[in-house]
Amino acid sequence: MQCCVRRKLARRVLRALRQEANSLQRYKEVSYKLENKVVELIQTQTVKDHLIKSLDEDKGKLEQQVTFWQEKFKAEKELRLHVEASLAETVAERETQEEAFEEERKALSADAHSKVAGVKKSLATLQTTLDQSQETVSKLEAENKRLQAKIEESAFSLFLSLFSQGESD
């Protein structure tokens, strides 16, 4: 019986030693895994730190670009407003000039129409005068022919009477 008890005790001790050995092996494995994990995390952290640093630099550059473009946009906006104001001024001046030209054109057109009407009236008067003058000229030519014929007739009769007196003498 003592043998059995010793055997049992030895088995218990053996089991405990095996468990302890397994535990140490397990601790070594876990320790090794944890060391690998720590190394991996350190590498990951280093990569992330570099990435953060790079992103911070990019952020700074982008902020500078945003500031540059904001200033450029502001300048362009001011220029656009200035050009729009200048354009509005020019358009207003042009409209004023167009109105003045339109008024002048209307005045000149009215003046031209009145002059044309006056010229037409004068032309009609001159045409009437011309017609009357031509009629008078025709009448005078006819009268002139009649008087020339009468003069010729009178001259012929005088010539005949002088000729007949000269023969009678």
Image: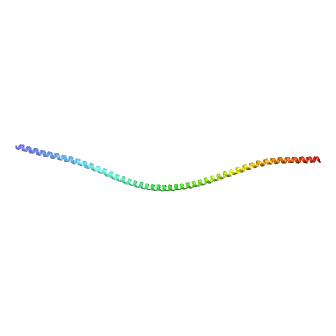
Q: Residue at x 59, y 53 (%)?
A: 106
Q: Residue 114's spot in the image, x, y percent?
A: 63, 53
Foreground of the two, 12 or 135 = 135
63 vs 40, left or right, is: right
Foreground of the two, 38 or 137 = 137
Q: Residue 22's spot in the image, x, y percent?
A: 17, 45
Q: Residue at x 25, y 48 (%)?
A: 37
Q: Residue at x 88, y 47 (%)?
A: 157
Residue found at the far right of this picture: 169
Q: Residue 28's spot in the image, x, y percent?
A: 20, 47
122 vs 78, left or right, is: right
Q: Residue 160's spot in the image, x, y percent?
A: 89, 46
35 vs 159, left or right, is: left
Residue found at the far left of this picture: 1
Colouring scheme, one of rainbow, by chain, secondary structure, one colour: rainbow
Quarter of the image where the N terminus is located? top left
59 vs 158, left or right, is: left
Total labels: the figure holds: 0
Q: Residue at x 17, y 47 (%)?
A: 23
